[in-house]
Image (tube, rainbow, N blue to C red):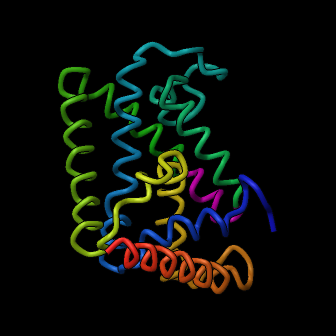
Amino acid sequence: MARGILDLEKHFAFYGAYHSNRINVGIHVVFVWPILFTALILMALASPKPLMPLPLPAKTLPLQDFMVINYSFLFAGFYALFYTALDKRAGSLAAAMCLACWIGANAAAQKMGFSLGWKVAAGGQIFCWTAQFIGHGVFERRAPALLDNLVQALLMAPFFVLLEVLHDVFGYEPYPGFYKNVRNKVGAEIAKFRSGKSKKV
């Protein structure tokens, strides 16, 4: 079991403590990946010219015109590598999804152009973030994780919802006992939060 920055249990328990309500989790399952996708569109629009040429001969791969080495690639690539390091199986799926989002974002940016593209992507960001804040305020009744740890919350959110779906649908867990350990840590974190809240009241 990895420790430090690759401690998946610790990351998952931190994020899970802010997402214990099933409706709120469902809202995040629907809207987290679109947030990543529209963010990649904005990054693609911000760097229309490649940072470097794709190291492949012309027309080698399908969709190669949209495989642009730009800011969106750097962002998606970092997420892909981090998720694969956290868990090889689910992380590889998450990495493939990140790279698909990168290609799709560049395709969308090229098709829409800057004027329309940034409006669509910014509108998507506003809509998806609003839905998540509603999920926290109405159903979770706890501020989002990003208010306590912005980097960890933004970095873990896509992988968190993917693992939730894989667990709920296929019973997947990175290793035996993972979810039992996480549930215990989440329960302790929620109890700590409620205790501190009651003391303030």
Tell me if residue 27 comes above or below residue 36 in the rendering. below
Location of residue 176 in the rendering, given as x and y in whole percent from the top left corner: 74, 84
* Magenta-colored segment: predominant secondary structure: helix
Quadrant location of residue 181? bottom right
Q: Nearer the viewer, residue 91 or 130?
A: 130
User: Per the image, is 89 magenta?
Assistant: yes
**Looking at the image, which residue is at 52% across and 45% down?**
151
**Looking at the image, which residue is at 36% across and 80% down?**
22
Circle count:
0
Tell me if residue 109 comes above or below residue 76 in the rendering. above
Tell me if residue 137 comes above or below residue 67 in the rendering. below
Location of residue 30 in the rendering, given as x and y in whole percent from the top left corner: 32, 64
Q: Nearer the viewer, residue 184 or 93?
A: 184
Q: Position of 16 compared to 180: left or right? A: left
Location of residue 70 in the rendering, given as x and y in whole percent from the top left corner: 51, 23
**Looking at the image, which residue is at 24% across and 66% down?**
137
Q: Position of 179 compared to 114: left or right? A: right
Q: Nearer the viewer, residue 133 or 110?
A: 133
Name the image quarter holding the C terminus.
bottom left
**Looking at the image, which residue is at 51% across and 52% down?**
97
Magenta region: 87-96
User: Per the image, is 21 magenta?
Assistant: no
Q: Position of 170 compared to 142: left or right? A: right
Name the image quarter holding the N terminus.
bottom right
Location of residue 191 in the rendering, given as x and y in whole percent from the top left corner: 49, 82
Q: Nearer the viewer, residue 94 or 62?
A: 94
